[in-house]
Amino acid sequence: MSKVKPPKSKGIPSKHLHARTTFLYQAATYLTLQTASNQAVDDPLADDQASSQTRSPVAIRLCSDLQQVSRKAQLRLSVHLKRTMCKRCNTVLVPGRTATQIVENLSKGGKKPWADVLVLKCTTCGGKKKFPVGATKQPKKKDRIVVTEDDTSTTSPGDLQEPDSAVQTSTEIDSNTG
Ligand SMILES: [Zn+2]
């Protein structure tokens, strides 16, 4: 029996799975916000009950489903989506509701502005996510400018030194030595 290849579908492959992950994420976010807002309205004295109400079990279930779908189908989730989900407890991280957001700088005296790190802490499980904010992202390997020893005219974009002045100084050095 010969294998008949299915006709190639146009557009995004596994579109229905993308739709499913999007729906799961939106539903989980909605439920998380609903639960969090209900908890905020409640009596602040009832802390013991409130802590159990902060997390919606349905939202966590939806989030774990979302993770499973993405793993099974090998879907690459968007960066925003990944950054707003806790890896440990599958809570949707909403700053101010289910997560706390602070900027940390662990450099000596906090002097290095590029050492700023955004720390998103899950209030449910205490898990932390860290994202660099001050540092400039290193360009991809293919985008990097390769400076070879033979070709000295190639300058990186970050190089502020003008090529003309560089040539002048080199000639001056030559005249001094010669
Ligand atoms: Zn968590």
Image (cartoon, rainbow, N blue to C red):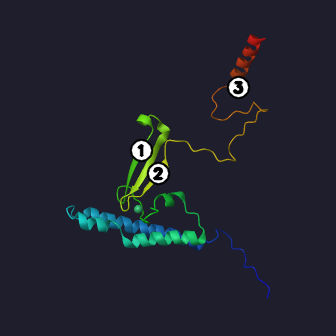
Ligand 1's image quarter is bottom left
Instruction: In the displayed orientation, state which residue is furthest to the bottom.
Output: 1
Task: Tell me if mark 2 has few (under 14), some (14-19) or many (20+) residues whose alpha carbon lies within 10 angstroms of its own.
Answer: some
Q: Reading the chain from its start, which is encountered first: label 1 or label 2? A: 1
- C-alpha span from label 3 to label 1: 39 Å
In the displayed structure, would residue 4 be above or below residue 81?
A: below
48 relative position to 116: left or right: left
Could you tell me if the residues under marks 3 and 1 are in contact, i.e. CB atoms within 8 Å? no
| Quarter of the figure with residue 172 | top right
In the displayed structure, would residue 84 be above or below residue 16?
A: above
12 relative position to 146: left or right: left
102 relative position to 43: left or right: right
Disc 3 marks a residue whose amino acid type is Pro
Q: Nearer the viewer, mark 3 or mark 1?
A: 1
Mark 2 CB within 8 Å of ligand 1: no
Disc 2 marks a residue whose amino acid type is Lys
Q: Mark 1 points at which residue?
A: 104
The residue lying at 54 percent from left, 72 percent from top is 69
The residue lying at 33 percent from left, 67 percent from top is 35
In the displayed structure, would residue 170 be above or below residue 145?
A: above
The residue lying at 35 percent from left, 55 percent from top is 96
Q: In which quarter of the image is the C terminus?
A: top right
Q: Where is residue 127 in the image (x, y as percent from the top left)?
A: 41, 58
- C-alpha span from label 3 to label 2: 40 Å
Q: Mark 3 points at which residue?
A: 163
Q: Reading the chain from its start, which is encountered first: label 3 or label 2? A: 2
Q: Position of residue 32 (x, y in %)?
A: 38, 66
Q: In which quarter of the image is the N terminus?
A: bottom right
Q: Mark 2 points at which residue?
A: 130
Disc 1 marks a residue whose amino acid type is Glu
